[in-house]
Amino acid sequence: MNILVVLGSSRENSRSLKVVNAILEGAKTKKCNIKIYNLNEIELKGCIGCGCCRKNSIDCVIDDGLKDYFNDLHNCDVLIISGANYYSMPCGQMITYMNRHYCLTDSNKNNRLKPGKQLISVFSQGAPENYPKYVPHYEWFINTFVSKGIELLSSINIGGNTDLSDDGEVIKDSVILGKSL
Ligand SMILES: Cc1cc2nc3c(=O)[nH]c(=O)nc-3n(C[C@H](O)[C@H](O)[C@H](O)COP(=O)(O)O)c2cc1C
């Protein structure tokens, strides 16, 4: 099983990272390959709307830190996307990353990804869990991936009030989720 992980936050004490690590801890109980893209460590350029991808049915041609990502995405079984809420939305680097998935639809509006992939999303916010105003923003983000044929397995929204202790429900459930992959 190939697991592709995208980190939108890597700050010390990142809460979204803590949840991702719990999922990976569970996943590692089985044989799996894990590849991680840390959006704050790679060179990340925005989509320039060149249209090259859709015209030629190819992956994004921008030469940056996502160069190998699309190949990894085509080959993965599970995609985990994670990060922080900044100003009510997934943070800027996550949106820049998400915009780059325009290439996964061809000129006939067909998905270029093989079916059978699963998605887990982890969003962390300062506001309480499932603060209603943010839910549609996360759904909008996730839909970019779901619309490319990736099945949403789990969407985890953690708030400033969420208990992330090792024996708390969210971390324990995240380990179980990882084991279930
Ligand atoms: C620039 C900035 C903007 C933020 N804006 C919001 C916000 O609008 N709503 C909110 O609930 N939390 C907001 N937060 C809090 C973060 O979402 C929260 O600290 C979250 O845990 C960050 O994720 P991380 O721990 O994985 O880095 C903001 C934090 C920063 C640094």
Image (cartoon, rainbow, N blue to C red):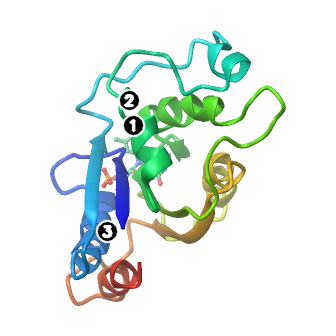
Q: Amino acid at mark 2?
A: Leu
Residue 66 badge: 2
* Residue drawn at (35%, 87%) of the image: 176
Eyeballing the image, is 108 above or below 136? Answer: above
Can you tell which quarter of the image residue 167 is in? bottom left
Q: Amino acid at mark 1?
A: Tyr
Mark 2 or mark 3: whose residue is earlier in sequence: 3
Can you tell which quarter of the image residue 136 is in? bottom right
Numbered marks: total: 3
Residue 73, position as x, y percentages in the image: 46, 46
Q: Within 10 angstroms of label 1, few (less than 14), some, or many (20 or more) residues?
A: some
Eyeballing the image, is 6 above or below 53? Answer: below
Residue 90, position as x, y percentages in the image: 51, 44
Label 1 beta carbon less than 8 Å to ligand 1:
no
* Residue drawn at (35%, 78%) of the image: 178
Residue position for label 3: 19
Residue 109 badge: none
Badge nearest the viewer, 3 or 1 = 1
Residue 117, position as x, y percentages in the image: 55, 61
Residue 88, position as x, y percentages in the image: 55, 46
Task: Quote the CA–CA distance across marks 1 and 2.
Answer: 5 Å
Q: Amino acid at mark 3?
A: Val
Q: Within 10 angstroms of label 2, few (less than 14), some, or many (20 or more) residues?
A: many
* Residue drawn at (49%, 19%) of the image: 46
- Pointer 1 with pointer 2, Cβ within 8 A: yes
Of residues 175 and 34, the one drawn nearer to the viewer in this rendering: 34
Secondary structure under the numbered disc 2 in the rendered image: loop
Label 3 beta carbon less than 8 Å to ligand 1:
no
Residue position for label 1: 69
